[in-house]
Image: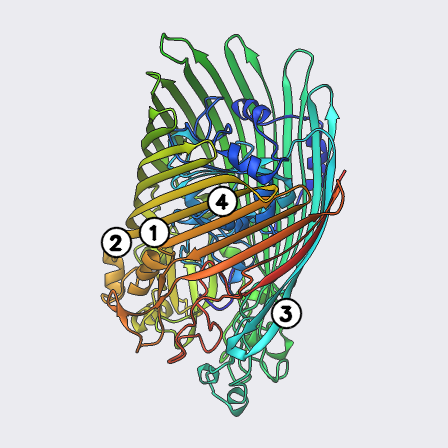
């Protein structure tokens, strides 16, 4: 965790609302195979037990391009979560949190007090990095964020902002838990998440909900009520012709911040340690917890069938978000303060303004035996990063207190064509053949902050630049682009009545990183009609994200031993200063994925799946540690960079191996005039390091003692995700009532400790954090055919992660009394009520 710093930014939006309206005229539907699939899948409007009973037999879009493949008979593990399940998991409005509630293979760490991570958070699938899972919307690739993650356990990654997807637009979610780079392209290392939008032709729904955290916070011995969240949304469907539809909707969500910092004991960290600094010990001066956030969403999903049989389709999502976070507290007597402005010290407030837009439009039809789909898509993500209640102390009392720090803009435009057909070659079932091609262009730009945000003023005893910054300089702005061309082929057939075999191959050419070929083999054998074994072998190629090649920013971080703050520069690998520390051009990550599993239906209402996997990743990209020492300080001063004390960059530093096991059990039964679905899902997961690249000749010349990754950085990569996660669920539905209960056990994890007296684990001071349970409960009462009221709570037993050791500054001076990487979070219990009206 790093005390408040970070980047992001600007870019003037070219009227996305108008772009959505114009795209509406293009109308439409998803990809060729996706549309055929959606035409046959349930809309999940029945009871939950009915939905659960059918879920394993429902057709799925991901995993296979054969149009009749179900979850059960797939050769790879797939989860499908219907409308009711998704809606119940979306109690807080966060799609990422909902995915964590639904799947044991997904975690959604809630990094606290960590710059841009207050606004953009990534999900993990099977313990891998957030940018090693591919996200699709209606079967189409989703663009990534403009924000590089520099704060979490997977610093240096560029995730998809899953929370930019309108929650009330979601019909159902499919999760492919298997490597799929040959089928879907770069990023599908751990698997694929496909979010399918609502498409009902008629009717609508509107809802309003209110919730808040209510918790007893032990570090201050207070009962707190905060995090108040109001969600209002509505969606409606209009029929187009005999079979077409236009579904559209909007949502707004406002969330108040939470505060989970403990009493301070960090006055001694102030440079001058004045009496005013010491007087603040014992008071809560830091900020930890969720940021203040406002989200506004729009979406549409539409299809129109023409007289000649062509289907026009289009869908779009828009998210505008503002968030206010908080940086590390600056003490009154510290050189970073100007007493005339902040006589009692100050805590900078970080400000993030984000706009995320995605538009897809296309046409599909048939030509002879072929079904084809041609589409175009645009995705853009812009992030303006600023800070208020701050100061550039080198400017003295004349300094502004509000600054724009930087702006970042990522855009992706693509054209693709896909075609599928069945070929009878004398086998028990026709051969399913799919081919396709895609062209994609990506651009990434960064813009400078205000001049005052990076200025070095006349007060030379004070640090230059805005606190919680400094801002990006004009000379450090970036403007880059690249093109990607890909072709693929995918075949699948039942070679015998029991044996299914599939193969996929993809060739991709990147204008900046060269070309690569990937492949996948998969098979499924039915021992009986209700018991099958399955397995797959694949390799994937993940080119460095464009953001990873051009991102730079300076932040205020703790030094290596956590005893002081320093300005650390994160530089692109191409930067001359980074090159002088040994940085080299980034290389693509390459991975192999092996899985073996079984699926069993011992009865019509019962199913069991078990899948084991091994994922090996070579040349994994990660952020180096902050390279800092007396020798580094001297080297930087000699090269005219006395404004920074450490250097970091992204590099291909790791080869890792992840092993795991997924077990899922579902059972339905009649119960007291209703239907009850019981389910249990378990994930076991462990990552180990096969190889670590720790140094270079250039770095040795500067300081032979330094390594690119400290032992603490390596420790977090191996141990920061829970070793296990168990979800136990029950969903009972009757004519006028419904009750859902979900118990989640987050397994043990470990993290390094700043307490030098902490026990040694893997040779460094560290703390073992035990497993923790969370219990969620919701009940619904149908007041009428159209009106339903729901009342519930998440983590209703008010559980927290295990406390961090309270000695030797292990809590960052009281700022973080709880371990912040545990997926359960540090907000305690959350209670809510929701009123839903359908029409």
User: What separation in Å lies between label 2 and label 4 (alpha carbons)?
Assistant: 47 Å
| Location of mark 4 (residue) | 678
Residue at horizontal 32%, vertical 30%?
533
Most extreme residue toward the front, as rendered? 672
Residue at horizontal 65%, vertical 43%?
168
Say which mark, if any, is on residue 225.
Answer: 3
- Say which label, 1 or 2, has the lower sequence index: 1
How dense is the environment of label 4, judged by Cα within 10 Å: few (below 14), some, or many (20 and up)? some
Q: Is residue 670 above or below residue 7?
A: above
User: What separation in Å lies between label 4 and label 1 (alpha carbons)?
Assistant: 46 Å
Image quadrant where one finds the C terminus: top right
| Mark 4 vs mark 3: in front | 4
| Mark 3 vs mark 2: in front | 3
How dense is the environment of label 3, judged by Cα within 10 Å: few (below 14), some, or many (20 and up)? some
528 left or right, relative to 8:
left
Say which mark, if any, is on residue 651.
Answer: 1
- Say which label, 3 or 1, has the lower sequence index: 3
The percent coordinates of residue 610 (x first, y second) are 35, 39
């Amino acid at each position: 965790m790093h005390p408040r710093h970070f980047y992001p930014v600007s870019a003037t939006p070219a009227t996305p609302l108008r772009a959505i309206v114009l795209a509406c005229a293009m109308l439409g539907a998803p990809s060729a195979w996706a549309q055929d699939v959606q035409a046959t899948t349930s809309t999940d409007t029945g009871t939950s037990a009915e939905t659960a009973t059918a879920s394993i037999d429902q057709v799925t879009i991901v995993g296979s391009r054969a149009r009749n493949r179900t979850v059960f008979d797939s050769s790879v593990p797939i989860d499908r979560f219907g409308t009711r399940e998704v809606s119940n998991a979306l109690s807080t409005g966060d799609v990422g949190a909902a995915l964590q509630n639904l799947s044991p293979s997904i975690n959604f760490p809630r990094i606290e007090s960590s710059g841009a991570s207050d606004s953009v958070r990534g999900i993990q699938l099977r313990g891998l990095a957030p940018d090693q899972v591919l996200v699709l919307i209606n079967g189409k690739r989703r663009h990534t964020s403009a924000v590089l993650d520099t704060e979490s356990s997977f610093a240096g990654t560029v995730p998809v902002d899953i929370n930019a997807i309108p929650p009330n637009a979601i019909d159902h979610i499919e999760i492919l838990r298997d490597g799929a780079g040959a089928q879907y392209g770069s990023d599908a290392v751990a698997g694929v998440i496909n979010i399918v939008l609502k498409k009902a032709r008629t009717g609508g729904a509107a809802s309003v909900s209110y919730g808040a955290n209510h918790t007893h916070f032990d570090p201050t011995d207070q009962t707190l009520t905060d995090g108040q969240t109001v969600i209002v949304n509505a969606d409606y469907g209009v029929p187009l012709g005999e079979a077409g539809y236009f579904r559209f909707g909007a949502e707004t969500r406002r969330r108040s911040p939470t505060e989970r910092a403990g009493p301070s004991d960090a006055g001694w960290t102030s440079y001058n340690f004045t009496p005013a600094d010491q007087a603040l010990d014992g008071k809560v001066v830091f900020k930890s917890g969720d940021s203040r956030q406002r989200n506004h969403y729009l979406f549409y999903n539409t299809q129109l069938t023409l007289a000649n049989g062509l289907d026009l389709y289009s869908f779009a999502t828009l998210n505008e978000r503002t968030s206010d976070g908080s940086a590390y507290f600056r003490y009154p007597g510290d050189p970073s303060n100007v007493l005339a402005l902040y006589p009692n010290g100050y805590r900078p407030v970080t400000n993030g303004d984000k706009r995320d837009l995605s538009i897809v439009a296309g046409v599909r039809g048939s030509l002879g035996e072929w079904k084809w789909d041609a589409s175009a898509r645009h995705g853009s993500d812009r992030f303006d990063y600023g800070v208020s209640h701050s100061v550039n102390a080198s400017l003295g009392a004349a300094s502004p207190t509000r600054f724009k720090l930087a702006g970042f803009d990522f855009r992706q435009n693509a054209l693709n064509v896909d075609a599928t057909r069945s070929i009878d070659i004398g086998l028990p079932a026709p051969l399913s053949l799919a081919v396709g091609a895609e062209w994609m262009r990506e651009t990434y730009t960064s813009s400078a902050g205000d001049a005052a945000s990076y200025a070095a003023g006349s007060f030379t005893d004070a640090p230059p630049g805005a606190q919680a910054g400094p801002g990006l300089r004009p000379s450090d702005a970036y403007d880059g682009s690249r093109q990607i061309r890909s072709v693929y082929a995918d075949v699948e057939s039942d070679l015998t009545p029991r044996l299914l075999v599939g193969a996929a191959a993809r060739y991709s050419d990147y204008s900046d990183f060269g070309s690569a070929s990937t492949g996948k083999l998969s098979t499924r054998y039915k021992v009986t009609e209700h018991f099958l074994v399955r397995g797959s072998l694949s390799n994937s190629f993940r080119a460095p994200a464009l953001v990873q090649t051009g991102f730079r920013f300076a932040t205020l971080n703790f030094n290596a031993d956590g005893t002081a703050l320093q300005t650390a520069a994160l530089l692109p690998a191409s930067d001359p200063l980074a090159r002088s520390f040994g940085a080299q051009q980034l290389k693509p990550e390459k991975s192999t994925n092996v899985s073996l599993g079984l699926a069993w239906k011992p009865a019509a209402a019962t199913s069991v799946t078990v899948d084991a996997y091994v994922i090996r990743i070579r040349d994994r990209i990660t952020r180096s540690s902050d390279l800092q020492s007396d020798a580094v300080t001297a080297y930087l001063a000699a090269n005219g960079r006395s404004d920074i004390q450490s250097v970091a960059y992204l590099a291909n530093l790791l080869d890792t191996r992840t092993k795991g096991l997924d077990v899922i059990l579902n059972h339905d039964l009649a119960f007291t005039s209703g239907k009850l679905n019981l389910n249990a899902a378990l994930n076991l997961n462990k990552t180990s390091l096969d190889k670590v690249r720790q140094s270079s000749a250039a770095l040795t010349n500067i300081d032979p003692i330094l390594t690119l990754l400290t032992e603490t950085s390596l420790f977090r990569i191996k141990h920061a995700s829970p070793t296990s996660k168990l979800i136990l669920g029950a969903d009972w539905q009757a004519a006028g009532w419904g009750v859902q209960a979900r118990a989640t056990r987050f397994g043990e994890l470990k993290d390094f400790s700043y307490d030098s007296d902490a026990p040694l684990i893997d040779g460094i001071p560290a703390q073992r954090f035990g497993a923790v349970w969370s219990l969620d409960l919701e009940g619904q009462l149908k007041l009428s055919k159209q009106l339903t009221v729901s009342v519930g709570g998440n983590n209703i037993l008010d559980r927290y992660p295990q406390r961090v050791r309270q000695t030797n500054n292990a809590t960052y001076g009281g700022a973080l009394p709880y371990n912040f990487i545990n997926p359960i979070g540090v907000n305690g219990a959350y209670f809510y009520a929701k009123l839903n009206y359908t029409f």
